[in-house]
């Protein structure tokens, strides 16, 4: 199941939470679900503004623009924090794995026992 091609951030974030849950990253999935729940109306407002601007071009109010920018910044911050956190986790996972692996033994040079 791939990433849906939609512009609704609520749906995309919900899909992300579901994918995280499938990867057993329950805490991250719950964090994103809580973000969506807490910002449901602003996220819906942003989607309505997108659709309105795309399919019904007309002037938007300054307040609408301000609300849209505010929630867009929140989503950006969420995603940026999430990416940084997971990059760090990935780095530590790689380091931990590297430290626990047995190093391959280097082939020994056999000493010649014959004298010349």
Image: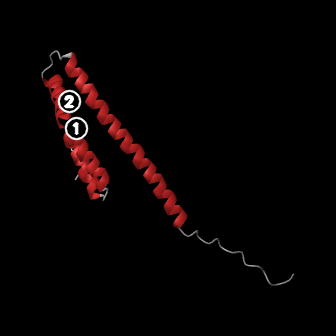
**Which residue in the rendered view is the most extreme toward the right?**
116
Apparent side of residue 80 relative to residue 99 in the rendered image (left or right):
left
Q: Quadrant of residue 75?
A: top left
Q: Secondary structure at mark 2?
A: helix
- Residue 59, how many percent across, how many down? 17, 15
Label located before the other in sequence (1 or 2): 1
Q: Taking 63 as reference, is 91 left or right? A: right
Residue 68, image x and y in percent? 23, 26
Near mark 2 (Cα within 10 A), the count class, few <14, some 14-19 or many ≥20, is: many
Q: Which residue is mark 1?
A: 9
93 left or right, relative to 108:
left
Give 114 or 64, whichever is nearer the viewer.
64
Residue 56 x, y percent position in the rendering = 12, 21
Q: Residue at x 72, y 75 (%)?
A: 109
Residue at image location 29% in from the left, 53% down from the top:
20
Residue that lies at the very extreme toward the left in this rendered image: 56
Residue matched to label 2: 46
Residue 73, visible in the rendered structure: yes
Q: Is residue 44 left or right of residue 78?
A: left
Report helix, strand or loop for mark 1: helix
Seen in the picture, residue 44 relative to 116 is either above or below; the reply is above
Residue drawn 45% across and 49% down? 88
Q: Residue 29 appears at what percent x and percent y?
A: 27, 51
Q: Which mark is residue 44?
A: none
The crowd level at tag 1 (other Cα within 10 Å; few <14, some 14-19, many 20+) is: some
Q: Nearer the viewer, residue 22 or 62?
A: 62
Q: Kindly tell me whether residue 5 is visible in this rendering.
A: no
Q: In the rendered view, would you say 29 is above or below 99? A: above
Vertical comparison of 20 with 109: above or below:
above
Circles 1 and 2, Cβ within 8 Å, touching? The answer is: yes
């Amino acid at each position: 199941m791939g990433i849906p091609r939609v512009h609704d951030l609520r749906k995309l974030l919900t899909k992300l939470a579901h994918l995280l849950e499938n990867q057993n990253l329950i805490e991250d999935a719950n964090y994103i679900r809580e973000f969506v729940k807490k910002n449901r109306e602003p996220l819906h407002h942003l989607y309505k503004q997108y659709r309105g601007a795309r399919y019904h071009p007309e002037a938007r109010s300054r307040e609408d623009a301000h609300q849209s920018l505010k929630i867009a910044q929140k989503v950006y911050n969420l995603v940026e924090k999430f990416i940084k956190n997971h990059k760090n986790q990935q780095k530590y996972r790689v380091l931990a794995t590297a430290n626990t692996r047995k190093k391959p033994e280097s082939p020994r040079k056999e000493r010649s026992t014959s004298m010349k």
